[in-house]
Image (cartoon, coloured by chain):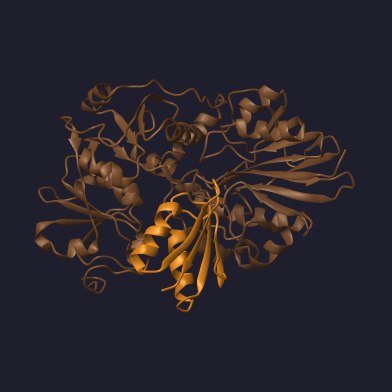
Chain colours: A brown, B orange
């Protein structure tokens, strides 16, 4: 048997990582995503036999592939014994040790991200800590967010998080690699990681839980929490049921009339084309979500979780990628797809066009002739914004759409145009006339004339 | 290929942060110097060239590595 190796499987669309730890023959899989074909590829490539599939916690940001993987490869499926799940598994307690070939894995209770969160210390044959899988506890220069269970528990979990990160630093060797699940763009991270790898020793120098007082840590952590996708609330209930593996069977091909008929009934049609092509010609009611990393997050905010979706895209590959990204967060209910070229919707009764402009174009229109809608997050808005903008953060738009004045065109912008085109299509769906400002308004930018002082 | 003056690793950052960091990094460079940007956000494939165009900085090169993207931008 060779030395111990850790293979990282990145999921950039969620900002998460999964891991395969192996000694050349035996493997332990940590926090696998729903699409376990990517894990199986690693296992086949290295010729590995999985002894254990372990979860650091019942995940809030994705549907796990752990249950399906463990049964497929006939491995033990391990979670904290205190996690209330509806399937057979090996329940773990603090200090329990699993053996996999020459490797051993010790469970370390590290509550904070969730109340029952476990980290796993990977030990070699000499009892040396090779690495620690920290899930949503110790991340790279930050920690996992502590507000996912409920507001009444946030303070208590934040205090637990502080102690848990300190416990990892106290009990695991400085040379051990840190292998978190969150923090690579994940909304499960309290703030975003800026490193690609780290060790316990390196975290000792800059992790806020290790360099700050508990009170300063709590102030920074709770003050810095940003909105998280509403779909999160559906993930834990799905995960305790033991979700099935990702099914990559393409959805049924629908023709234009069938999609149009569904739209008239209020169905959710997701058009994945780029914003230029979409806004030139689309079906009224369709949501324009470009195939970007943020797709699951953005749709999670906009589209009711239980809906049956129709996907529209340039080709089957794009639709297949979106299907995979959506399945990771449990949007399994795809009822059909439509491959659209330019001209597919031309002349159709539901065909719409949204004008695309920029801030220069906006400046030519009188203030009282349009509404300007800024859909960026509050921190972005507060750093500078168009003086006449109405602010409704993207993730609050569905519930606050009543605050957008009717009767005038709505000019909508964000930082880069990505959120704005989704919001624009949502506004059209809601009966507004819209102009998409496909322009940049980065933090600190003040488009148009100088913004009025705060309070005016 | 021009000499890279500075490299910005924006891996793991989500929209709009790769563009935000790119602007901050470009602000630190002199005219004619070249910034290399690394991103894992596929939205960067659209955003960074569009940002370069809107600001007059020249996109010298871009590479699509599937889940890792690199850009060379020469400051105007």
**Where residue A74 sits: x, y (%)?**
72, 23
Outermost residue on the bottom side: it is: B30
Quadrant into which the N terminus of chain A falls: top right
Q: In this rendering, does residue A110 appear at all?
A: no
Asked whether, in this view, residue A421 is left or right of residue A25, the answer is left
Asked whether, in this view, residue A387 is left or right of residue A202, the answer is left
**Where residue A343 sits: x, y (%)?**
25, 34
**Where residue B44 sits: x, y (%)?**
45, 54
Q: In this rendering, does residue A259 appear at all?
A: yes
**Where residue A158 sits: x, y (%)?**
56, 54
Does residue A213 sit above or below A290 in this rendering?
Answer: below
| Residue shown at the point (29%, 41%) measured from the top left | A278
Q: Quadrant of residue A270?
A: top left
Does residue B29 sit above or below A296 in this rendering?
Answer: below
Frontmost residue, A345 versus A335: A345
Frontmost residue, A257 versus A239: A257
| Residue shown at the point (24%, 65%) measured from the top left | A386
């Amino acid at each position: 048997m060779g030395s111990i190796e850790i293979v990282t499987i990145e999921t950039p669309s969620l900002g998460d990582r999964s891991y395969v730890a192996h000694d050349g023959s035996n493997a332990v899989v940590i926090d696998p995503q729903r699409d376990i074909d990517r894990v199986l590829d690693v296992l086949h490539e290295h010729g590995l036999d999985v002894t254990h599939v372990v979860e650091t916690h019942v995940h809030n940001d994705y549907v796990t592939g752990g249950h399906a993987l463990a049964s497929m490869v006939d491995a033990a499926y391990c979670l904290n014994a205190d996690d209330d799940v509806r399937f057979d598994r090996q329940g773990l307690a603090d200090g329990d040790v699993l053996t996999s070939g020459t490797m051993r894995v010790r469970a370390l209770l590290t509550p904070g991200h969730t109340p029952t969160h476990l980290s796993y210390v990977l030990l070699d044959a000499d009892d040396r800590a090779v690495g620690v899988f920290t899930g949503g506890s110790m991340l790279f220069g930050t920690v996992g967010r502590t507000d996912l269970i409920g507001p009444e528990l946030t303070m208590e979990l934040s205090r637990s998080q502080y102690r848990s990160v300190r416990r990892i630093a106290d009990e695991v060797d400085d040379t051990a690699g840190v292998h978190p699940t969150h923090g690579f763009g994940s909304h499960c991270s309290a703030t975003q990681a800026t490193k690609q790898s780290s060790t316990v020793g390196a975290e000792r120098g800059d992790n806020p839980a290790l360099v700050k007082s508990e009170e300063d840590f709590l102030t920074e952590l709770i003050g810095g929490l940003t909105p998280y996708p509403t779909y999160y609330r559906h993930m834990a209930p799905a995960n305790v049921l033991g979700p099935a593996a990702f099914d990559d069977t393409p959805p049924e091909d629908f023709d234009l009339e069938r999609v149009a008929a569904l739209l008239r009934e209020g169905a959710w049609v997701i058009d994945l084309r780029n914003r230029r092509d979409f806004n030139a010609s689309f079906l009224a009611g369709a949501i324009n979500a470009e195939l970007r990393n943020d797709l699951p997050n953005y749709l999670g905010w906009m589209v009711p979780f239980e809906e049956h979706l129709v996907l529209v895209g340039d080709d089957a590959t794009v639709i297949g990628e979106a299907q995979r990204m959506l399945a990771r967060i449990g949007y399994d209910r795809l009822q059909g797809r439509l491959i659209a070229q330019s001209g597919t919707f031309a002349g159709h009764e539901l065909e719409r066009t949204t004008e695309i402009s920029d801030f220069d174009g906006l400046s030519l229109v009188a203030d009282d002739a349009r509404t300007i809608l800024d859909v960026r997050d509050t921190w972005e808005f507060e750093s500078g914004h168009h003086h006449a903008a109405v602010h409704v953060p993207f993730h609050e738009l569905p519930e606050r759409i009543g605050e957008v004045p009717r009767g005038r065109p709505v000019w909508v912008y964000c930082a880069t145009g990505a959120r704005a085109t989704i919001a624009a299509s949502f506004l059209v769906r809601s009966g507004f006339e819209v102009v998409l400002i496909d322009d940049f308004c980065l933090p600190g930018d003040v488009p148009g004339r100088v913004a009025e002082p705060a309070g005016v | 290929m021009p000499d890279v003056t500075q490299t910005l690793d924006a891996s793991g950052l989500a929209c709009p942060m790769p563009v935000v960091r790119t602007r901050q990094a470009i602000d630190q460079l002199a005219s004619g110097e070249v910034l290399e940007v690394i991103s894992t956000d596929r939205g960067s494939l659209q955003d960074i060239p569009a940002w370069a165009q809107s600001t007059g900085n020249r996109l010298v090169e871009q590479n699509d590595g599937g889940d890792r993207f690199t850009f060379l931008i020469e400051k105007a």
